[in-house]
Image (cartoon, helix red, strand yellow):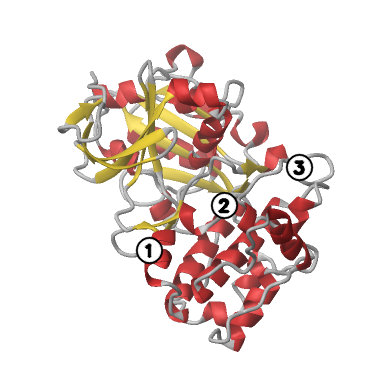
Amino acid sequence: MMSEISGDRPSEKILFDRYAVGRLLGRGAFAKVYHARDTLTGSSVAVKCIAKHRILKSGLSGNVEREISVMRRLRHPNIVRLHSVLASKSKIYFVVDLAKGGELFSRISKSGRLTEDLARRYFQQLISAVGYCHSRGVFHRDLKPENLLLDESGDLKVTDFGLSAVSDQIRTDGLLHTLCGTPAYVAPEILTKKGYDGAKIDVWSCGVILFVLVAGYLPFNDPNLMVMYKKIYNGDYKCPRWASPEAKNLISRLLDSNPETRITIDGVIEDPWFKKGLKGPVRFFHDHEADMPKRVELGDRFMNAFDIISFSTGFDLSGLIEPGVTDRERFTAVGAAEGVMVKVEGYFGVRRRGKGLGVCVVEGQNGNFVGRVWVYRLTEGVSVVEVEKGVGWGEVIGGGLREAVEGGGEGEVVGV
Protein backbone atom coordinates (compact mmCIF):
# COMPACT_ATOMS: atom_id res chain seq x y z
CA MET A 1 0.00 0.00 0.00
CA MET A 2 2.73 2.46 0.86
CA SER A 3 6.43 3.03 0.48
CA GLU A 4 7.91 4.92 3.41
CA ILE A 5 9.77 8.10 2.51
CA SER A 6 13.34 8.17 3.71
CA GLY A 7 16.47 10.15 2.93
CA ASP A 8 16.86 13.63 1.47
CA ARG A 9 16.88 12.67 -2.22
CA PRO A 10 14.46 9.77 -2.59
CA SER A 11 13.70 8.26 -5.94
CA GLU A 12 10.05 8.62 -6.81
CA LYS A 13 8.02 6.47 -4.43
CA ILE A 14 4.29 5.94 -4.25
CA LEU A 15 2.62 6.95 -1.01
CA PHE A 16 -0.65 5.19 -0.20
CA ASP A 17 -0.97 4.08 -3.84
CA ARG A 18 -1.72 7.66 -4.86
CA TYR A 19 1.04 10.24 -4.39
CA ALA A 20 4.28 9.85 -6.35
CA VAL A 21 6.79 11.52 -4.03
CA GLY A 22 9.90 13.13 -5.48
CA ARG A 23 12.53 15.63 -4.41
CA LEU A 24 12.94 17.24 -1.03
CA LEU A 25 11.72 20.87 -1.02
CA GLY A 26 12.65 21.85 2.51
CA ARG A 27 12.95 20.79 6.09
CA GLY A 28 12.17 22.13 9.52
CA ALA A 29 12.77 21.00 13.08
CA PHE A 30 9.98 18.42 12.97
CA ALA A 31 9.05 17.94 9.31
CA LYS A 32 10.30 17.52 5.77
CA VAL A 33 8.40 18.76 2.73
CA TYR A 34 8.52 16.90 -0.58
CA HIS A 35 7.30 17.59 -4.08
CA ALA A 36 4.74 15.01 -5.15
CA ARG A 37 2.38 14.19 -8.01
CA ASP A 38 -1.20 13.12 -7.47
CA THR A 39 -1.47 10.05 -9.71
CA LEU A 40 -5.27 10.36 -9.75
CA THR A 41 -5.45 13.94 -11.04
CA GLY A 42 -1.92 14.47 -12.39
CA SER A 43 -1.55 17.69 -10.37
CA SER A 44 1.52 18.66 -8.34
CA VAL A 45 1.18 18.85 -4.56
CA ALA A 46 3.43 19.16 -1.55
CA VAL A 47 3.68 16.41 1.06
CA LYS A 48 4.65 17.47 4.57
CA CYS A 49 6.10 14.48 6.42
CA ILE A 50 6.07 14.69 10.22
CA ALA A 51 7.71 12.15 12.51
CA LYS A 52 5.22 11.19 15.23
CA HIS A 53 7.83 10.57 17.91
CA ARG A 54 9.30 14.05 17.46
CA ILE A 55 6.04 15.93 17.93
CA LEU A 56 5.11 13.74 20.88
CA LYS A 57 8.48 14.28 22.52
CA SER A 58 8.33 18.05 21.96
CA GLY A 59 4.75 18.35 23.16
CA LEU A 60 3.58 19.84 19.86
CA SER A 61 0.90 17.27 19.08
CA GLY A 62 -1.72 19.89 19.97
CA ASN A 63 -0.39 22.20 17.23
CA VAL A 64 -0.66 19.43 14.65
CA GLU A 65 -4.17 18.54 15.77
CA ARG A 66 -5.21 22.19 15.69
CA GLU A 67 -3.81 22.71 12.21
CA ILE A 68 -5.68 19.71 10.86
CA SER A 69 -8.91 20.77 12.54
CA VAL A 70 -8.73 24.32 11.22
CA MET A 71 -7.54 23.61 7.69
CA ARG A 72 -10.41 21.17 7.16
CA ARG A 73 -12.74 24.17 7.45
CA LEU A 74 -11.00 26.42 4.94
CA ARG A 75 -11.39 26.50 1.15
CA HIS A 76 -10.17 29.82 -0.24
CA PRO A 77 -7.97 30.68 -3.24
CA ASN A 78 -5.48 32.53 -1.00
CA ILE A 79 -5.19 29.84 1.67
CA VAL A 80 -3.05 26.72 1.27
CA ARG A 81 -5.49 23.85 0.88
CA LEU A 82 -5.20 20.68 2.91
CA HIS A 83 -6.11 17.86 0.52
CA SER A 84 -5.48 14.83 2.73
CA VAL A 85 -4.09 13.79 6.09
CA LEU A 86 -2.60 10.31 5.99
CA ALA A 87 -0.58 8.29 8.46
CA SER A 88 1.68 5.30 8.87
CA LYS A 89 2.83 3.84 12.18
CA SER A 90 5.65 6.35 12.48
CA LYS A 91 4.69 9.36 10.35
CA ILE A 92 1.89 11.80 9.59
CA TYR A 93 1.54 13.18 6.08
CA PHE A 94 -0.14 16.46 5.12
CA VAL A 95 -0.93 16.67 1.41
CA VAL A 96 -1.29 20.37 0.57
CA ASP A 97 -1.13 22.84 -2.30
CA LEU A 98 2.30 23.22 -3.86
CA ALA A 99 3.49 26.85 -3.58
CA LYS A 100 6.18 27.02 -6.25
CA GLY A 101 7.03 30.66 -5.50
CA GLY A 102 8.25 29.95 -1.98
CA GLU A 103 7.92 32.27 1.02
CA LEU A 104 7.04 35.93 0.61
CA PHE A 105 9.65 36.54 3.31
CA SER A 106 12.39 35.21 1.01
CA ARG A 107 11.32 37.56 -1.76
CA ILE A 108 11.44 40.57 0.57
CA SER A 109 14.81 39.47 1.97
CA LYS A 110 16.31 39.26 -1.53
CA SER A 111 14.76 42.32 -3.19
CA GLY A 112 13.93 44.58 -0.24
CA ARG A 113 10.74 46.62 -0.23
CA LEU A 114 8.09 46.11 -2.89
CA THR A 115 6.42 48.69 -5.07
CA GLU A 116 3.18 49.97 -3.56
CA ASP A 117 1.17 48.40 -6.36
CA LEU A 118 2.64 44.95 -5.71
CA ALA A 119 2.40 45.43 -1.93
CA ARG A 120 -1.25 46.37 -2.36
CA ARG A 121 -1.95 43.29 -4.49
CA TYR A 122 -0.52 40.95 -1.85
CA PHE A 123 -2.26 42.86 0.92
CA GLN A 124 -5.63 42.63 -0.85
CA GLN A 125 -5.21 38.87 -1.12
CA LEU A 126 -4.13 38.65 2.52
CA ILE A 127 -7.19 40.58 3.72
CA SER A 128 -9.48 38.44 1.57
CA ALA A 129 -8.05 35.29 3.16
CA VAL A 130 -8.07 36.64 6.72
CA GLY A 131 -11.62 37.98 6.39
CA TYR A 132 -12.70 34.59 5.09
CA CYS A 133 -11.08 32.86 8.09
CA HIS A 134 -12.84 35.18 10.51
CA SER A 135 -16.19 34.53 8.82
CA ARG A 136 -15.58 30.82 9.50
CA GLY A 137 -14.71 31.49 13.14
CA VAL A 138 -10.95 30.95 12.64
CA PHE A 139 -8.23 33.31 13.91
CA HIS A 140 -4.71 32.70 12.61
CA ARG A 141 -2.73 34.39 15.43
CA ASP A 142 0.66 34.04 13.73
CA LEU A 143 0.44 36.04 10.52
CA LYS A 144 3.88 37.04 9.18
CA PRO A 145 5.69 36.96 5.80
CA GLU A 146 7.24 33.57 6.64
CA ASN A 147 3.71 32.12 6.72
CA LEU A 148 2.71 33.65 3.41
CA LEU A 149 3.62 31.61 0.32
CA LEU A 150 3.46 32.40 -3.39
CA ASP A 151 2.11 30.04 -6.03
CA GLU A 152 3.32 29.70 -9.61
CA SER A 153 1.09 32.62 -10.67
CA GLY A 154 2.55 34.86 -7.99
CA ASP A 155 -0.62 34.80 -5.88
CA LEU A 156 -0.43 34.77 -2.12
CA LYS A 157 -1.29 31.70 -0.01
CA VAL A 158 -1.68 31.83 3.77
CA THR A 159 -0.29 28.79 5.58
CA ASP A 160 0.72 27.44 9.02
CA PHE A 161 -2.40 27.35 11.19
CA GLY A 162 -0.64 25.57 14.06
CA LEU A 163 -1.23 28.49 16.46
CA SER A 164 -4.71 29.35 15.24
CA ALA A 165 -7.83 29.48 17.37
CA VAL A 166 -11.50 28.88 16.65
CA SER A 167 -14.53 30.69 18.00
CA ASP A 168 -15.45 27.91 20.44
CA GLN A 169 -12.17 28.59 22.32
CA ILE A 170 -13.43 32.05 23.30
CA ARG A 171 -14.16 32.33 27.02
CA THR A 172 -17.30 33.74 28.57
CA ASP A 173 -15.71 37.20 28.58
CA GLY A 174 -15.70 37.07 24.78
CA LEU A 175 -11.90 36.97 24.56
CA LEU A 176 -9.03 34.59 23.87
CA HIS A 177 -6.31 34.24 26.50
CA THR A 178 -3.55 31.99 25.11
CA LEU A 179 -0.29 33.89 24.65
CA CYS A 180 1.11 33.17 21.19
CA GLY A 181 2.54 34.74 18.08
CA THR A 182 5.91 35.97 16.84
CA PRO A 183 7.39 38.83 18.93
CA ALA A 184 7.78 41.42 16.15
CA TYR A 185 4.20 40.83 14.94
CA VAL A 186 2.40 40.45 18.27
CA ALA A 187 -0.39 42.92 19.08
CA PRO A 188 -0.03 45.19 22.15
CA GLU A 189 -3.12 43.82 23.89
CA ILE A 190 -1.55 40.35 24.01
CA LEU A 191 1.25 41.83 26.12
CA THR A 192 -1.22 42.93 28.80
CA LYS A 193 -2.25 39.29 29.42
CA LYS A 194 -5.85 40.39 30.01
CA GLY A 195 -7.36 38.64 26.99
CA TYR A 196 -7.77 39.75 23.40
CA ASP A 197 -10.04 39.65 20.38
CA GLY A 198 -8.68 37.15 17.82
CA ALA A 199 -9.87 39.19 14.84
CA LYS A 200 -8.25 42.39 16.13
CA ILE A 201 -4.85 40.83 16.71
CA ASP A 202 -4.91 39.39 13.17
CA VAL A 203 -5.64 42.90 11.86
CA TRP A 204 -2.64 44.24 13.80
CA SER A 205 -0.40 41.55 12.28
CA CYS A 206 -1.73 42.45 8.83
CA GLY A 207 -0.64 46.02 9.56
CA VAL A 208 2.88 44.90 10.42
CA ILE A 209 2.97 42.85 7.21
CA LEU A 210 1.80 45.82 5.11
CA PHE A 211 4.49 47.99 6.71
CA VAL A 212 7.15 45.38 5.86
CA LEU A 213 5.92 45.11 2.26
CA VAL A 214 6.07 48.87 1.75
CA ALA A 215 9.14 49.68 3.86
CA GLY A 216 11.28 46.55 3.54
CA TYR A 217 11.89 46.40 7.30
CA LEU A 218 9.95 45.90 10.54
CA PRO A 219 8.08 48.77 12.23
CA PHE A 220 9.00 47.48 15.70
CA ASN A 221 12.49 46.07 16.11
CA ASP A 222 15.17 46.11 18.78
CA PRO A 223 17.86 43.67 19.97
CA ASN A 224 16.37 43.97 23.45
CA LEU A 225 13.04 42.12 23.46
CA MET A 226 11.59 44.18 26.30
CA VAL A 227 12.46 47.43 24.52
CA MET A 228 10.75 46.12 21.40
CA TYR A 229 7.65 45.16 23.40
CA LYS A 230 7.57 48.68 24.86
CA LYS A 231 7.61 50.14 21.34
CA ILE A 232 4.77 47.82 20.33
CA TYR A 233 2.72 48.68 23.42
CA ASN A 234 3.14 52.42 22.77
CA GLY A 235 2.70 52.15 19.01
CA ASP A 236 6.13 53.73 18.56
CA TYR A 237 7.12 53.48 14.88
CA LYS A 238 7.83 55.73 11.90
CA CYS A 239 6.65 55.20 8.34
CA PRO A 240 9.31 55.49 5.61
CA ARG A 241 9.41 58.77 3.69
CA TRP A 242 8.78 57.00 0.37
CA ALA A 243 5.40 55.61 1.41
CA SER A 244 2.42 57.46 -0.05
CA PRO A 245 0.18 59.48 2.32
CA GLU A 246 -2.69 57.04 1.60
CA ALA A 247 -0.55 54.02 2.54
CA LYS A 248 0.68 55.76 5.69
CA ASN A 249 -2.90 56.52 6.71
CA LEU A 250 -3.99 52.89 6.36
CA ILE A 251 -0.93 51.64 8.23
CA SER A 252 -1.64 54.03 11.08
CA ARG A 253 -5.21 52.71 11.35
CA LEU A 254 -3.98 49.11 11.32
CA LEU A 255 -1.22 49.74 13.89
CA ASP A 256 -3.51 51.52 16.30
CA SER A 257 -2.35 50.36 19.75
CA ASN A 258 -5.92 50.71 21.04
CA PRO A 259 -7.85 47.63 19.85
CA GLU A 260 -11.16 49.44 20.40
CA THR A 261 -10.38 52.10 17.78
CA ARG A 262 -8.27 49.93 15.46
CA ILE A 263 -9.67 49.55 11.96
CA THR A 264 -11.63 46.37 11.25
CA ILE A 265 -11.47 44.10 8.20
CA ASP A 266 -14.69 45.71 6.94
CA GLY A 267 -13.05 49.10 7.36
CA VAL A 268 -9.95 47.99 5.48
CA ILE A 269 -11.88 46.93 2.39
CA GLU A 270 -13.47 50.39 2.24
CA ASP A 271 -10.13 52.20 2.49
CA PRO A 272 -9.28 54.21 -0.70
CA TRP A 273 -5.69 52.93 -0.89
CA PHE A 274 -6.81 49.33 -0.47
CA LYS A 275 -9.54 49.59 -3.12
CA LYS A 276 -7.22 50.72 -5.93
CA GLY A 277 -7.01 48.16 -8.73
CA LEU A 278 -9.71 45.87 -7.39
CA LYS A 279 -11.82 44.34 -10.15
CA GLY A 280 -14.79 43.84 -7.86
CA PRO A 281 -15.85 43.98 -4.21
CA VAL A 282 -14.03 41.87 -1.64
CA ARG A 283 -16.55 39.33 -0.36
CA PHE A 284 -15.91 36.83 2.39
CA PHE A 285 -18.83 34.49 1.56
CA HIS A 286 -17.77 33.88 -1.99
CA ASP A 287 -15.89 31.70 -4.43
CA HIS A 288 -17.99 28.61 -3.86
CA GLU A 289 -16.63 27.22 -7.12
CA ALA A 290 -13.08 27.58 -5.74
CA ASP A 291 -14.51 26.67 -2.35
CA MET A 292 -15.24 23.13 -3.43
CA PRO A 293 -12.63 20.53 -2.54
CA LYS A 294 -11.17 18.87 -5.60
CA ARG A 295 -12.67 15.55 -4.61
CA VAL A 296 -16.06 16.88 -5.76
CA GLU A 297 -15.15 15.22 -9.04
CA LEU A 298 -15.99 11.92 -7.33
CA GLY A 299 -19.65 12.84 -7.67
CA ASP A 300 -19.62 12.08 -11.39
CA ARG A 301 -18.09 8.63 -11.22
CA PHE A 302 -18.15 5.53 -9.06
CA MET A 303 -15.96 5.43 -5.97
CA ASN A 304 -12.93 3.21 -6.43
CA ALA A 305 -10.98 1.28 -3.81
CA PHE A 306 -8.72 4.22 -3.03
CA ASP A 307 -11.68 6.56 -2.47
CA ILE A 308 -13.23 4.17 0.02
CA ILE A 309 -9.93 3.53 1.79
CA SER A 310 -9.22 7.27 2.01
CA PHE A 311 -12.52 7.67 3.90
CA SER A 312 -11.28 5.22 6.53
CA THR A 313 -10.18 6.73 9.82
CA GLY A 314 -7.12 4.51 9.63
CA PHE A 315 -5.81 6.59 6.76
CA ASP A 316 -7.51 9.94 7.36
CA LEU A 317 -6.40 11.41 10.69
CA SER A 318 -8.92 14.25 10.51
CA GLY A 319 -11.51 11.99 12.06
CA LEU A 320 -9.27 10.75 14.83
CA ILE A 321 -7.50 13.93 15.72
CA GLU A 322 -10.46 15.44 17.57
CA PRO A 323 -12.40 12.75 19.44
CA GLY A 324 -15.82 13.98 20.41
CA VAL A 325 -16.02 16.66 17.71
CA THR A 326 -18.75 15.83 15.21
CA ASP A 327 -18.41 18.54 12.59
CA ARG A 328 -18.08 15.98 9.79
CA GLU A 329 -19.85 12.68 9.21
CA ARG A 330 -20.49 10.22 6.40
CA PHE A 331 -23.29 7.72 5.91
CA THR A 332 -24.78 5.63 3.15
CA ALA A 333 -28.09 6.40 1.47
CA VAL A 334 -30.24 3.96 -0.50
CA GLY A 335 -30.84 5.25 -4.00
CA ALA A 336 -29.01 6.58 -7.04
CA ALA A 337 -26.69 9.48 -6.32
CA GLU A 338 -28.62 11.93 -8.51
CA GLY A 339 -31.84 11.20 -6.67
CA VAL A 340 -30.14 11.52 -3.30
CA MET A 341 -28.72 14.93 -4.25
CA VAL A 342 -32.17 16.11 -5.31
CA LYS A 343 -33.46 15.12 -1.85
CA VAL A 344 -30.61 17.02 -0.21
CA GLU A 345 -31.51 20.10 -2.24
CA GLY A 346 -35.13 19.76 -1.28
CA TYR A 347 -34.35 19.29 2.40
CA PHE A 348 -32.32 22.50 2.64
CA GLY A 349 -34.16 24.46 -0.04
CA VAL A 350 -30.90 25.15 -1.89
CA ARG A 351 -29.39 24.22 -5.24
CA ARG A 352 -26.05 22.57 -5.82
CA ARG A 353 -23.07 24.60 -6.91
CA GLY A 354 -21.41 23.75 -10.21
CA LYS A 355 -22.16 21.03 -12.72
CA GLY A 356 -22.75 17.38 -12.04
CA LEU A 357 -23.50 16.05 -8.60
CA GLY A 358 -21.00 18.35 -6.97
CA VAL A 359 -21.83 19.76 -3.59
CA CYS A 360 -24.61 21.66 -1.87
CA VAL A 361 -23.35 24.68 0.06
CA VAL A 362 -25.73 25.74 2.82
CA GLU A 363 -25.68 29.38 3.92
CA GLY A 364 -27.47 31.32 6.61
CA GLN A 365 -29.53 34.46 6.13
CA ASN A 366 -26.47 36.70 6.45
CA GLY A 367 -24.38 34.63 4.05
CA ASN A 368 -22.53 32.88 6.84
CA PHE A 369 -21.32 29.38 6.19
CA VAL A 370 -23.59 26.69 7.64
CA GLY A 371 -22.44 23.50 5.98
CA ARG A 372 -21.74 21.46 2.86
CA VAL A 373 -23.15 18.16 1.68
CA TRP A 374 -21.40 15.95 -0.91
CA VAL A 375 -22.96 12.92 -2.60
CA TYR A 376 -20.80 10.15 -4.10
CA ARG A 377 -21.80 7.09 -6.15
CA LEU A 378 -20.91 3.86 -4.38
CA THR A 379 -23.01 1.56 -6.58
CA GLU A 380 -25.99 2.09 -8.88
CA GLY A 381 -28.35 1.88 -5.94
CA VAL A 382 -26.25 3.08 -3.01
CA SER A 383 -24.62 6.48 -2.42
CA VAL A 384 -22.30 7.95 0.19
CA VAL A 385 -23.36 11.23 1.74
CA GLU A 386 -20.66 13.36 3.38
CA VAL A 387 -21.69 16.24 5.61
CA GLU A 388 -19.45 19.06 6.83
CA LYS A 389 -21.12 21.04 9.61
CA GLY A 390 -20.31 24.69 10.12
CA VAL A 391 -21.38 27.38 12.54
CA GLY A 392 -25.18 27.45 12.80
CA TRP A 393 -25.77 23.87 11.65
CA GLY A 394 -27.56 22.69 14.77
CA GLU A 395 -29.99 19.86 15.29
CA VAL A 396 -32.88 21.86 13.85
CA ILE A 397 -31.13 22.39 10.52
CA GLY A 398 -29.41 19.05 10.05
CA GLY A 399 -31.11 16.70 12.46
CA GLY A 400 -33.39 15.04 9.92
CA LEU A 401 -31.04 14.91 6.94
CA ARG A 402 -30.37 11.18 7.16
CA GLU A 403 -34.05 10.37 7.24
CA ALA A 404 -34.71 12.77 4.37
CA VAL A 405 -32.24 10.99 2.08
CA GLU A 406 -33.03 7.46 3.37
CA GLY A 407 -29.68 7.13 5.17
CA GLY A 408 -29.11 5.18 8.35
CA GLY A 409 -26.50 4.28 10.90
CA GLU A 410 -26.59 0.61 9.81
CA GLY A 411 -25.01 1.47 6.47
CA GLU A 412 -22.55 4.04 7.80
CA VAL A 413 -19.16 3.99 6.09
CA VAL A 414 -17.27 6.02 8.67
CA GLY A 415 -18.31 8.45 11.38
CA VAL A 416 -16.05 11.40 12.06
- Residue 155 shows which numbered tag? 1
Q: Residue at coordinates 43% horizontally, 20% vertically from top-left?
A: 313
Between disc 3 and disc 2, the foreground one is: 3
Residue 153 visible in the shown view: yes
- Residue 121 shows which numbered tag? none
Left or right: residue 185 versus residue 75 is right
Q: CA distance from mark 3 to mark 1?
A: 33 Å
Query: Which amino acid type is marked by label 1?
Result: Asp
Q: Nearer the viewer, residue 268 or 382?
A: 268
Q: Nearer the viewer, residue 320 or 93?
A: 93
**Where residue 382 appears, x then y in whole percent?**
34, 22
How many numbered discs, if any? 3
Helix or strand or loop: what does disc 2 sit on? helix
Q: Nearer the viewer, residue 172 or 30?
A: 30
Of callouts 1 and 2, the N-terminal one = 2
Q: CA distance from mark 3 to mark 2?
A: 19 Å
Q: Dot 2 corresponds to which residue? A: 133
Q: Residue furthest top?
A: 410
Q: Dot 3 corresponds to which residue? A: 177
Of callouts 3 and 1, the N-terminal one = 1
Helix or strand or loop: what does disc 3 sit on? loop
Q: Residue at coordinates 58% horizontally, 81% vertically from top-left?
A: 240
